[in-house]
Image (spheres, helix red, strand yellow):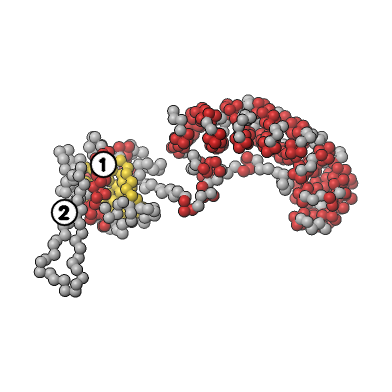
Amino acid sequence: RTTNAGAFMSVIFAFLSLAEKVEGMKEQIVTRVKAPLITMMTGGSTELMYVLLKHVDVLIELCPGVFDDEYRQFYIRFHEPTSVKYLKTTVLAKLVNPTNAPDIVAELTECVANTDTTLSRLSVRALARIACRNVGGEGCAESIACRLVEMVDLDIPHVSSEAATAMVDLLRKNPGLKEVIAPPLPRALKYVTENSGKTSVIFLLGECGDVVREAPYCLEKLIDSYDNIKSPDVKIALLTSTIKLFFQRAPEVQKMLGRLLLKATEDVTSQDLHDRALLFYRLLKTAADPKVVQDILATSNNIAGSSTNFAEESCDDDFRQLLMQEFNTLSIVYGATNDNFIAEENQVKLVKLPRDHPLDSGAPPAENLEVNNLADEMQQTSLLDNNKTAVAAPAPVPVAPTVSAPAPAHEVDLLGFGTEPTPAPVHAPAGLSLNPAAALSGEEYQSMWGAVSDADAHVIILPLTSLPASTDVVEEPLAGLSVKTMASGELESELKFFLYGQESSADATFYLAQASISKTSSPPEMFLTIKANSSSNDRQKAEQFVDVMKAALSSFTQ
């Protein structure tokens, strides 16, 4: 119910993260947030509209079909900025289904005649993408093909060129549309002026040579004016299409192909063109079966400068998953992970939580506390025997606070170095008083820990100024303030502690703590999971217990 878009997107990200491993849950979440998200998108500023639209685009790819019924909300409006119009054109193509396909195709067709050339081109590409994905139901691809044929005949250079390029992609995906696409090609070659469009028309003439009777003669005019062609892409398409026609209609094409190969092999303006022509010439001349050239051409339908990638070809599930991990950030707006546009020293480093951390997604369920592996972890510590057998830890001997003895009065500083400074005693903070005589056995510790669910645990992160050199430098000051150590140990990647303390009060509440200090995190931090065996389970008391630990570890804490 908030009007803060940042908070709203953060909540969406939180729910999507929680539903990562629950099948079907993401669709339910996106369905639930669809209406308020569209309301926020249409009612905010243009900048906010663009950012939310980028996030909607990602959600559409994550859960296809959820936003299909709201396709009218993505229609282009005249007062919107060009950035929003361009993005809406891309999004509309992803919302098509057999029910709404006629409306969306009609809307995109209207945008083709827009005075904004970029919007016009994007609309043609969106139509081609719909037809190539074949999501509009029966007859949708044929209908779009007919519209593209009409656009080729329009007296608008950029529309004719873009429509010809779209027809190339459409023919690649639907070879059965050759009869629909072929008729306008001979006349289109005369008035399509852009190099990309001319390249596409020449390519289509080579593909539809068996349908277009005048195809060889159209290409022959270009071969005769070869020296006037400046674009290498047009020349490569002309070479490829002429060879394709040669295998379909050899008597008509043989002589013109010879003239073309002669000019292309002598052309030094494009190394690619020269090498292709030389390869085709040698194969046709020396190969045992000249049709090997036909096989080579049949394996590659891509032509330089005119073919666009389809959504299915550019889909990268791994990249999409990485992008979703940075949801509600600039990564969604830029369409790239943060390491592509943020300097390494400014990137946020994610630190993996300890295995037994209650907030870790891999933590065991609260009701099955035995799988917390508390005993197994304690076996790795320094208080258990060498053969790592599961033996209950003996009750620790209460450690009295250490007090520095005063230097004897008769001691004389003969060398003039001065007396050794006496460390200042550590005093417990006011609020929580701990019993210095408290004691627990290993079995009692495990029993108390298991009796309190993980849901009732208090998780606190304690920042440190430096990494302790060993477990002893942590245990000794803690023991001075009656925080006892049940077990501890130095593992490969962390320092591990199992601590406890007993309140000096009538109810004698025990506070149990699992602490871990990662060796790899910078700056170092101590992760504390605290449980109390009292019925109140007061977080304030848990924080007071942490204050006692902070006072003891004042040399390491901030």
Q: Position of residue 439 (x, y in %)?
A: 18, 48
Residue 393 in sight in this render: no
- Could you say which disc has been placed on residue 262 in the image? none
Q: Quadrant of the N terminus?
A: top left
What amino acid type is highlighted by mark number 2?
Ala
Location of residue 404 by image quarter: bottom left
Label 2 sits on a secondary structure element that is: loop
Q: Are marks 2 and 1 in contact (CB under 8 Å)?
A: no
Q: Give whichever of 108, 62 is nearer the camera.
A: 108
Q: Is residue 491 above or below residue 432?
A: below
Vertical side of 425 occupied by 181: above or below: above
Nearest the camera: 345 or 287?
345
Left or right: where 514 falls relative to 76: left
Amino acid type of the residue that numbered disc 1 sits on in the rendered structure: Ala
Q: Which residue: 20% across, 48% down?
A: 428
**Measured along the vertical axis of the image, is residue 531 above or below residue 424?**
above
Q: Secondary structure at mark 1?
A: helix
Q: Residues within 10 Å of mark 2 (few under 14, many from 20)?
A: few
Badge 1 local density, few (<14 within 10 Å), some, or many (20+)? many
Labels in figure, total: 2
> Residue at the spot x=81%, y=56% of the render?
267
Q: From the viewer's perspective, is 545 left or right of 180?
A: left
Residue placed under numbered mark 2 in the picture: 400
Q: Is residue 359 left or right of residue 430?
A: right
The numbered dot on residue 542 is 1
Q: Residue drawn 23% across and 55% down?
A: 476
